[in-house]
Amino acid sequence: MNKIITKWIEPYILLETLKKDCKLIKDFTFDGFSKDNIKQEFLKQLKKENNFGLYMKNVNKFYLFNGAVDIAKLFELKPAEYEITTDMEKSFETIDMGKAEASLIKL
């Protein structure tokens, strides 16, 4: 289950807040040429137990975390400020198109 966040949250604040409650395992830096290959490696790592990912708008990185977090509760998000989806590609596409600020991805 993935959560797509539409409310603007400062990327640094989002990242540092998650790091307080969860372990940052790795960040995957990509560019326009390497994005697809890096994304596949990122998705492979998400399959491990308790791992989840973070993908943010205007940040050329995928972040891999281990732990559990309720992002809606943590940032006091209202239902209109995030969307829950099982569509993996939508979690990436809404960020790439600038329609959302961040996605938390959980396989």
Image (spheres, helix red, strand yellow):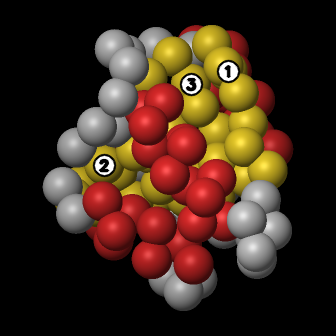
In the rendering, at what x and y percent does residue 7 appear? 52, 64
Q: Is residue 30 above or below residue 68?
A: below
| Residue sitting nearer the eye, 91 or 6 | 91
First-in-chain label (3 vs 2): 2
In the rendering, at what x and y percent does residue 6 appear? 47, 67
Label 3 crowding class (10 Å Cα cut-off): few <14, some 14-19, many 20+?
A: many
Q: Is residue 43 left or right of residue 56?
A: left
Element type at marker 3?
strand
Work out whether residue 53 can be spotted: yes
Q: CA distance from mark 3 to mark 2?
A: 14 Å
Residue at 22% of width from left, 43% of height from top?
Answer: 1
Q: Is residue 96 above or below residue 10?
A: below
The residue that disc 1 covers is 24
User: Which quarter of the picture shows residue 17?
Assistant: top right
Work out whether residue 78 can be spotted: no
Q: CA distance from mark 2 to mark 1?
A: 18 Å
First-in-chain label (2 vs 1): 2
Amino acid at circle 2: Asn
Residue at 73% of width from left, 36% of height from top?
Answer: 27
The residue that disc 3 covers is 65
Element type at marker 2?
strand
First-in-chain label (1 vs 3): 1
Is label 1 in contact with label 3 (beta carbons under 8 Å)? yes
The residue that disc 2 covers is 2
Is label 2 in contact with label 1 (beta carbons under 8 Å)? no
Residue at 46% of width from left, 67% of height from top?
Answer: 92
In the rendering, at what x and y percent does residue 49 appear? 34, 14
Amino acid at circle 3: Phe
Q: Is residue 57 left or right of residue 65?
A: right
